[in-house]
Image: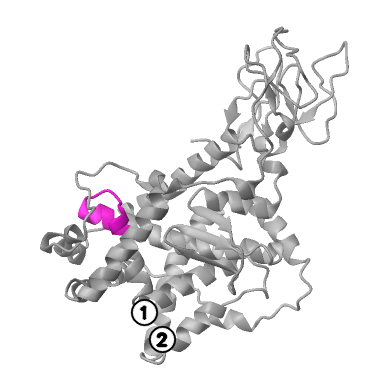
Amino acid sequence: MIKIINQKECPLCGELYDESDNFCSHHDDDAIKLVYSRDLVKFCPKCGMKFTEDDNFCSQHSDELVKLCHINELVKECKVCGAKYPENYNYCVRCYSDNPLINIIDIVNVKDIETHPNGYYNFKEYPNRFDEIKDLFSQSSKDKLFDFNLDQSEFDNIVFDIKDTYKNILAELIEKYHIDFNSLNPLEKILLFSKSFVKTEYKEGGGDLGHFEFNEIYIDDRATTAIQITTIIHELSHFLLAEILEQIVSLLLNTDKTDVIEAFVCYTLVCDEFNYLVDEYCAHTVEGRFAVLGYQDYGSYKSVLANFLKEYSEDYVDVAKSIGNTFAYYIKDIMTSFIDEKLREEIKEEFMKINDVPKYSELQFETSEVLEWQRFSKAIKIILTTNIDNIANNPQDMEKLKLYAVKFKKNNHG
């Protein structure tokens, strides 16, 4: 796994270290001090040594001044030794090959990067693969869901695997597109983060700021930068809640995650009023954590709540909030493994550019209650099983479930 945020690096040889280390162990003659990788943004084209933003010339060449270049300017490569160069170099100055440098990349905009990472989020090989609706609704499958033999450590492993997988995908994207991560603005960083989980694109129009459906997130780029950031976080939270539930179903049924599994979880979340309320509250809560105080927005939750209260009493609302906030607790843990304090400050600066007066009334919807495992696991079981018999016995529901599976298959596999 390649770490992105808190690793240290030897600027001379590129060896990576934990942030608790201070000097590189590979240089006996010189004490080479380690530097955070995020701060090494310049590069000597002649020797390959990395430098910080404040440096302008390479310190390794006493006989000449070799001007440094930004890492994201490296667009050419020597096909003999692999050394990389900016646009203004034509031949290699390390191995002095006579072969001209070759172009290796066109500068890519993060918005233009296309990803379909869903296949990566199968963490282990299971003996079963449920590709048919009937597999999911067999008596054996229903019994396993109702038994719900899931312990805290298994749930924690699911969260860990999600974090571990996105970090690897993110590192691959950075390497593939030669991205200087630290040169990205906060919106580009959050957008790249989201693309490590799920297809994330900009939409042409429509009345909403963004939406998530069938493993695709769409955002309106007409919104301010700060609002685009929190909208991505909101929609990504919907994906992560569904992803956690999909992994649980896969584990309980001992099957690979399939389009059918995803369709079942999607139906469970959007076609049950209580589950829908939990999902929407969770997404708003995660979003609100990364917005500046006074810019929290529970708009769509309030809309879902109004419809919910037409059928159900207020007694259910606090329960839904507690469950949603517990999911949010784990999803925020995934988020903060990427959104460190430095990036949070960058996001805050974007909010400071908004002219709207902060409104604190939305804070009334927040709760601090996080359920302990016994209650939380019972809540997850109820979310997954409440409607399973009704679906199985209702031809219209089964047809809708099949339609969802087709949509997932189309988006996941093209």
- Asked if the residues shown at circle 2 and circle 1 are in contact, with their CB atoms under 8 angstroms apart, the answer is yes
Does dot 2 land on a helix, a strand or a loop? helix
Q: Real-space Cα distance between discs 2 and 1?
A: 7 Å
Looking at marks 2 and 1 on the same chain, the residue that comes earlier in the sequence is marked by: 1
- The image position of residue 266, as x and y in percent, is 36, 66
Q: Which mark is residue 98?
A: none
Does dot 1 land on a helix, a strand or a loop? helix
What type is the residue that disc 2 sits on? Phe
What type is the residue that disc 1 sits on? Phe
Q: Name which residue lies at 66% across and 16% down.
A: 78
Q: Where on the picture, by quarter, is residue 381?
A: bottom left
- Range of residues picked out in magenta: 249-262
Q: Which residue is mark 1?
A: 274
- The image position of residue 250, as x and y in percent, is 27, 53
Which of 376/260 is in front?
260
Res 337 visible: no
